[in-house]
Amino acid sequence: MGTAFDYRKNRSKYVVIEIIKTIKDSDTVIERDMKLLALFFELFRTVLGIALEQLDRELATEYKKQGYIVERQDGRTVQCLCGIVSFVRRWMKKPGKKGIYPLDKQLRLKPYQRFSALLMKKVAETATSCVYRKTADIVNRFTLTTLSHQTVKHIVMQSGKLCQEWQDIQRQESPAEETEAPVVYIEGDGLVLRG
């Protein structure tokens, strides 16, 4: 596992060789399982990065048809449950319009967003039942990410803002209909008031 994956060449053969090597080189069952998990996550991150770059090329072709031109290519890193995923995407601009990253728009990644939506969701869910330090410990044990308790706090705050934005949008899209009740009954301490 010392070398980075070159998934574009000899894909399945390389993966099978690495799995066999990992199984043979492991002294204990737990060590083997941890190494295999790391290997599979590394494979997934690599393939995901390749897929995102392919999607970016396809999106760039579509945007070029709309009059956009590629101004530059920039790298992006997003921390996911499986670890850090890195990819390169295109900054495109159309005369008279604001520039965009088509891939970021497709993935709904906001500027400077460093964490995937699923990672943010899992961290926020875990943080509801324990303190931030414990949340960081749990996430670090069960994923290939490394988070501090301060990062957990940041993610929880970000998740709260995103949740509030989503709720505001939902309220705007579906205004509540007011209904009028013919009779209202209010009961308190055994006393019934009718109106």
Image (spheres, helix red, strand yellow):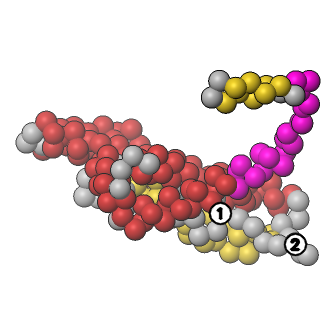
The answer to whether 159 is drawn above or below residue 97 in the figure is above
- Residue drawn at (7%, 42%) of the image: 27
The circle on residue 110 is: 1
Q: Is residue 38 above or below residue 19?
A: below
Distance from Cα at disc 2 to Cα at disc 1? 18 Å
Q: Amino acid at mark 2?
A: Lys
> What x and y, as percent, mark residue 2?
25, 58
Depth check, front residue: 166 or 86 = 166
Q: Quick one: 100 or 156, which is closer to the camera? A: 156
Q: Is residue 60 above or below residue 130?
A: below
| Magenta region | 165-183
Q: Is residue 6 visible?
A: no
Tell me which amino acid carries mark 1.
Answer: Lys
Q: Position of residue 168 (x, y in %)?
A: 75, 52
Q: Residues within 10 Å of mark 1 (few under 14, many from 20)?
A: few
Horizontal side, residue 161 vs residue 173: left or right: left
Foreground residue among 189 and 147: 189
Q: Secondary structure at mark 2?
A: loop
Q: Is residue 32 left or right of residue 59?
A: left
Q: Which residue is mark 2?
A: 97
Q: Is residue 169 magenta?
A: yes
